[in-house]
Image (tube, rainbow, N blue to C red):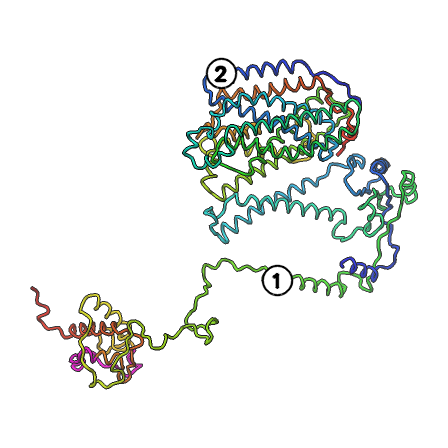
Amino acid sequence: MDYIKKQLPDSLTKTGGIMLAVGVLILIMAFIFTPERAFFDYLWIYLFMVSIGVGSLALVALEYLVGATWSTPFRRITEILASLTPVLIILAIPLFFGLHDLFHWTHAEAVEHDAVLQSKSPYLNVPFFMARTAFCLLLWVLFYYMLTRNSEKQDIDGDPKYTKRNVTLSTIFAALFVITITIAAIDWAMSLEPHWFSTIFGVYYFAGTVIAALAASTFASIKLKEGGYLDKSLGEDSFYSLGTLMFGFNVFWAYIAFSQFILIWYADLPEETFWLIHRWEGSWKFVSLALLFFHFVLPFLILVGRNAKTNLGLLKWMAPWMLVAHALDLYWLIFPTLFRGNASFGWQELSFPLIVIGLTMVVFKLSANKKNLMAIKDPKMQMGLDFHL
Amino acid sequence: MIGKILKKLDDKFLKSEPRTGELFAVAALFDTPDQIIHAAEKVSDSGYKKFDVLTPYPVHGMDGAMNLKPTGIGWVGLIAGMSGTFLAFLMIWWMVGINYPNIFGGKPYFNLPASIPIMFELTVLLSALTLVGSLIALFMKLPANANPLMDTDFIKRVTSDKFGIYIEAKDPKFKLEEVRAMFESLGSTSVSNIHDAEYDLGDTKNPLLNGKFIGAMLGTSVAVVGITYFVLNVLLFLPPFNWMHYQPKVLPQTESKFFKDGFSMRKPVEGTVARGFMPYEFKGMPDSMVVITPNPLPVTQKVLDLGKKRFDTYCSPCHGFYGKGDSRLRGQFPVPPTLHSQKVTNWKDANIYHVITNGQNTMPSYASSISRDDRWAIIHYLRVLQRSANAPDSDLETK
């Protein structure tokens, strides 16, 4: 391989910084005028950042765990995307001030007269909630540093022992990730409706995070390849598996979403159905239908063929498409708690795309400054570059 | 077991081993994926068309090395899969919507959510089976049921630990010595000629008309049909919901499997009397010995209605609805007497009760079919009939 490190353009930080600043400004305005809504927007942003950051970390671990060779040229890009994980700790702080606006179960006077919430209070209480969030975040950041440090050390001497260490770390992380992402999904998204419960909810959110991480990695990889930042010998066949995984996890997401739906629909118990009914009232109906078609049906039909997955021009569009679909998915999960009866999209929600895109660009550039964009001395790198279908 | 049977059949019909049929192909084995990629490139670059590569696992980059055009197998899978989706939809829609509508869990007869898992399963099943089927069809070139490569050392190794390539003798460029020399120069560990197998089929010109073959096919068909019938209708048969048609209760005139004597109906315990069936103290005695007792029932509308009902049921077939002896059975029995005669009109109620209970001439006893109170009610109603047949003019006067 003949990889030569090229610095990413500074316009990335400039454009990203401006977007981020405008987004934060809108969010601050929203905090002044509609504080409750602003916290929901912030939760939306936060969960999306978790999806990309922690999802990318899980993807890196997964690739180590199964010994994938095709993914080796892309792994560093996924690692750079995972550098959003440490940022999540800072981003979590404002959220703790909004607990009262976001979560009904924090209202002591409401819990007092509610048998269901009382019985759930050993789990759903503020100190334990904060402890769980801190545990998950610290665990993710710990594994982020351990995995990336080994990977970067390998750039210097190419010692295979770092790969072995990372495989062991990934094995441990895979088990812990499943637990922590379930906790995160239940705490941050499901407990918005504290009376409702779904045991598959953690898997549902997990499927979404992996799609988001894959889409972000695919988009970044294609952009970097077009800009000539990656090795010249990286061919289109290598992108096939990214597209296939994106397609596969999208089908998995639909499978889980349908599994959740059909059990609630079949049992028809009022304690479960109200959650879906809120998402079928008024204009929420169209959001639900849009989710079905935009997140599953259309991407399925577009990506099902083999040629679609090696067509970089198409993948470059399908990756942002899936990111928007995941944002819609999170919107569908979070906002019916706030907007009962009808969906709403106001100027406050504009902060979401601006902050999400801006922050990702800035963090990506800052993180990439110090690193090679490819794991140059990974023992599997040549096999990854030689990958053919 | 099947393997042994096939071996026996082979031993019986196969003309010779090693095979002596026409040359089918020249096959070569290689040790590494790199070698097989290199060999495939060399073969396709040399202009051979009828060749194929067999490896124990997918070797990446083989499509390019063999210079293969994009395969259309994806379309086969897509069409088969979509047929599965559509067929499952049609099947569920017809079964639960039209043929056997049942309500499950308060849902509509046909509903989409419950059908989606079945549509999904059939999509996977049909596309998987079709793809396996088309693989067999392409490899064996149906209707042939075997490929000459089968049962050779070559195929045994490529399904285990070696990488194989073969060039068919039908290829226009095929020249035995050239092909063998090329494989050897590529570093093959084993180059072999593969011949068609020749079978001894006796005198029959068309193997399809062979008596044994037809017999075996018929026997197999009968066995399959019989086993299928037995499994589906006996072993796995579940009775459909029968709307409570069969109930474990006793029915009249049926044998009881529960009681020792086989009777479904039980006799009352000895010495007990069923309600309303008090024994009659003048049973079998002549009319003159009856002690006259008054009718114990009051004359009310309710009693008269009951009497009419019982009279119409038990008495009217012979005596007629109005007691005039104009019965529906006239002509089949000796004509019963009218109940409006002087004799009956003058009888006390107890005398009539005695006749109903004991019977008279050809009239049997009604003691077992009409309860005591019902008999007294019939007598009240009979008095109404008698009065209506002999109404005095004063009855018509109005106040």
The answer to whether marks 2 and 1 sit on the same chain is: no
Residue found 53% across the figure and 25% down from its top: A43
Q: Is residue A183 visible?
A: yes
Establish if A82 lies above or below B261. above
Q: Mark 2 falls within which chain?
A: A
Give residue A29's mark. 2
Q: State yes or no: residue B331 in magenta.
A: yes
Amino acid found under the numbered disc labelled 2: Met
Who is closer to the viewer here, A62 or A351? Answer: A62
Q: State yes or no: residue B155 in magenta.
A: no
Counting from the top left corner in percent of width and height, residue A168 is at 72, 33
* Secondary structure state at the residue bearing disc 1: helix
Establish if A272 lies above or below B129. above
* Quarter of the figure with the N terminus of chain B: bottom right
Counting from the top left corner in percent of width and height, residue B300 is at 18, 67
Q: Is residue A318 visible?
A: no
Give residue B229's mark. 1
Counting from the top left corner in percent of width and height, residue A31 is at 48, 18
Within-10-Å neighbours for mark 2: few <14, some 14–19, many 20+: some
Counting from the top left corner in percent of width and height, residue A212 is at 61, 29
Q: Which residues are magenta?
A: B329-351
Q: CA distance from mark 2 to mark 1?
A: 76 Å
Extreme left residue here? B399
Amino acid found under the numbered disc labelled 1: Tyr
